[in-house]
Amino acid sequence: MPDILPDLTTHLGPLTLQSPLVLAASPWGQDATNLAQAGIGALTMNSIGPDPRTGHPEPTLHDWGAGLINAVGLANPGAAAAVEGLSALKAQLKQHGMVLVVSFFADTVDRYYEVGKTLAAVEPELAEVNISCPNVEDSFGMPFATACATGAAATRAAKAGLIDGGATCPMSVKLAPNVPNLLDIAHDVLDAGADLLTVSNTMPGMVIDVETRHPVLSNRSGGISGAALRPVAVKMVYDLTRTFGVPVIGTGGVLRGVDAVEMILAGASAVGLATVAHRHGAAGLRRVLAELDDWMSTHGVTTLQEIRGAAHG
């Protein structure tokens, strides 16, 4: 009898993805269509805000070995200008069996409503509300994700905007790692209308060049991602799925197939990744998928559901 090949089909809330890998929010630009051919399940473009924003001056991204540090500063064309491009990208991704995740942010609660209503015109299959970007504090103040009340208010406004704009898609809220009361914040965000959660956003940090004696980024500080963030994200996924049982996109430091397995064992419905794509492009994504497939075959696992949340036992 022939061996049964592993099935990477992934159920993320009401969505069905061809694989569990989701490209995390980043300015993928022209690379998006190339990355779409790697067999991943979904792609998240960089967060869109209410107004055009140039972000921080270069350098905004640095690979420090154990991960990346970035302070792009939420550069984007503004919601109204982004609709046409996102709609075109959605159609392109659909040709490759992929879902487009539309990510957005705002500087006030009311503007979360405005941006959500505007981006509803894209008819996104999944919306991701970024309430936790760590490298724009000078512009916007503390992230909404650092407190229950502000996190819930932003979530409620974003959901209302999407609905009033005619969108029927599920909505994920992206939470921050550097909070002492993650479960309280998640509870209130879910109560305010989130259907899914994405964890984690980057962790605030700084890397200093010892030769120039200056921080490597123009913004001085930025968000840490990559392997250094993975244990933090794994614990967040574990705690959230064990407590609430909601779909979670586990994001942070997934560079290998076994890293994706770890996230799924912790309870993740899907697995976000970005660093491997920045470093290796579509070839890196294909490698992660192949390694995941090999691990499943070696361990006699035919579907991801068989191992999802197994670490809770």
Image (cartoon, rainbow, N blue to C red):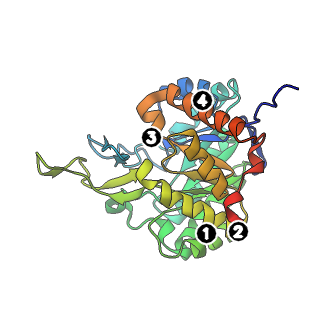
Mark 1 touching mark 4, by CB under 8 A?
A: no
Provide residue 25's location: percent of width, then percent of height.
Answer: 51, 44
In front: mark 1 or mark 2? 2
Residue position for label 3: 275
x 67%, y 32%: residue: 98
Per the rendering, the mark at residue 59 is: none
Q: Residues within 10 Å of mark 3 (few under 14, many from 20)?
A: many
- Secondary structure beneath disc 3? helix
Residue position for label 4: 89
Q: Amino acid at mark 3?
A: Thr
Instruction: Determine which quarter of the picture holds residue 96.
Output: top right
Alpha carbons under labels 3 and 4: distance apart: 21 Å
x 26%, y 41%: residue: 59
- Secondary structure beneath disc 4? helix
x 57%, y 28%: residue: 286
Disc 2 or 3, which lies upstream in sequence? 2
- Secondary structure beneath disc 1? helix
Alpha carbons under labels 2 and 4: distance apart: 33 Å
In front: mark 1 or mark 3? 3
Q: Is residue 27 visible?
A: no
Mark 1 touching mark 3, by CB under 8 A?
A: no
Residue position for label 2: 244
